[in-house]
């Protein structure tokens, strides 16, 4: 009887020693086990997703011609650009581009800057440096390739054969106070095409009005 009990105890000790050896001398805990990866695909955090590069409208315009005037207080607006792009491509063709900038400066301030700058070119018709005060919503449209010719002081000018740039400035009824749009086309814009299209529905974008 004693020998059987001793044999049983010895078997238990041997089994325990083998179990400790297999687990590295530590007790195994199911809660500490690492969960297997699903399909072997590592998850990607939202921060790791690459964002679309920000558009540098001023650099894009300078690449066409460094003489193109750009109002210093205006900032590129991607939301307005994307909305304007639909209208521009429908009006001037699929190769037309647009960069829309906006500023909280008043329309007379912006108008004064552009008309004063363009006055250095003989091809630009002389006009008052300040807009009329009788109009409700004031605008300014200039075909820069035509206006920026024959400067009084020799310097950069926009060549007629370059990509065509139409400058459109409009006063808005809400912030931003003034919107500046550069329409770029491979071919000259005809005067009939340059007219602002009528809006399909009310909009806060001044370029959607007549």
Image (cartoon, grey):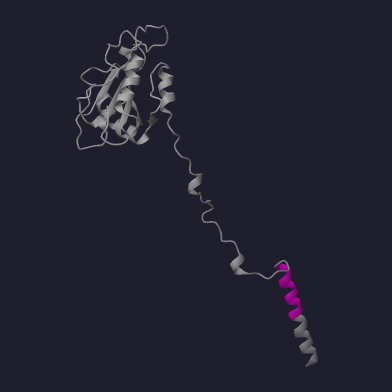
Q: Residue at x 22, y 28 (%)?
A: 137
Q: Residue at x 42, y 24 (%)?
A: 60
Q: Where is residue 44 shown, x and y percent of the image? A: 51, 49
Q: Quadrant of the N terminus?
A: bottom right
From this view, report whether residue 117 is shown above or below residue 176: above
Q: How many discs appear?
A: 0
Is residue 201 a member of the stretch shown in magenta? no
From this view, report whether residue 63 is shown above or below residue 209: above
Q: Residue at x 38, y 24 (%)?
A: 71
* Residue 165 position by quadrant: top left
Most common secondary structure along the magenta stretch: helix
Quick check: 2 left or right of 201?
right
> Which is nearer the eye, 62 or 150?
150
Q: Quadrant of the C terminus?
A: top left
Q: Where is residue 82 shown, x and y percent of the image? A: 33, 34
Q: Which residues are magenta?
A: 12-22
Q: Residue at x 30, y 9 (%)?
A: 123
Q: Where is residue 49 shown, x and y percent of the image? A: 48, 44
* Residue 10 position by quadrant: bottom right
Residue 182: tell me if it is visible.
no
Is residue 17 a member of the stretch shown in magenta? yes
> Which is nearer the eye, 203 or 92?
203
Quick check: 56 left or right of 83?
right
Q: Where is residue 103 shown, x and y percent of the image? A: 35, 31
> Which is nearer the eye, 3 or 126?
126
* Residue 77 position by quadrant: top left
Residue 31: tell me if it is visible.
yes
């Amino acid at each position: 009887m004693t020998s059987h009990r001793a044999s049983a105890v010895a078997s238990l000790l041997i089994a325990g020693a083998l179990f400790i050896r297999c687990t590295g001398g530590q007790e195994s805990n199911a809660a500490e086990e690492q969960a297997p990866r699903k399909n072997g695909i590592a998850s990607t955090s939202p921060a790791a997703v690459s964002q679309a590069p920000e558009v540098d409208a001023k650099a894009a315009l300078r690449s066409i011609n460094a003489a193109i005037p750009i109002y210093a207080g205006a900032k590129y607006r991607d939301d307005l650009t994307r909305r304007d792009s639909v209208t521009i491509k429908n009006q001037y063709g699929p190769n037309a581009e647009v960069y829309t900038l906006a500023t909280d400066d008043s329309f007379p301030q912006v108008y004064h800057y552009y008309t004063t700058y363009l006055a250095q070119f003989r091809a630009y018709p002389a006009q008052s440096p300040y807009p009329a005060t009788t109009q409700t919503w004031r605008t300014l449209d200039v075909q820069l390739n035509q206006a920026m010719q024959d400067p009084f002081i020799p310097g950069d000018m926009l060549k007629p054969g370059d990509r065509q740039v139409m400058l459109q400035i409009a006063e808005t009824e809400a912030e931003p106070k003034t919107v500046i749009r550069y329409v770029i086309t491979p071919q000259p814009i005809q005067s009939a095409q340059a007219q602002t299209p009528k809006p399909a529905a009310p909009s806060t974008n001044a370029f959607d009005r007549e």
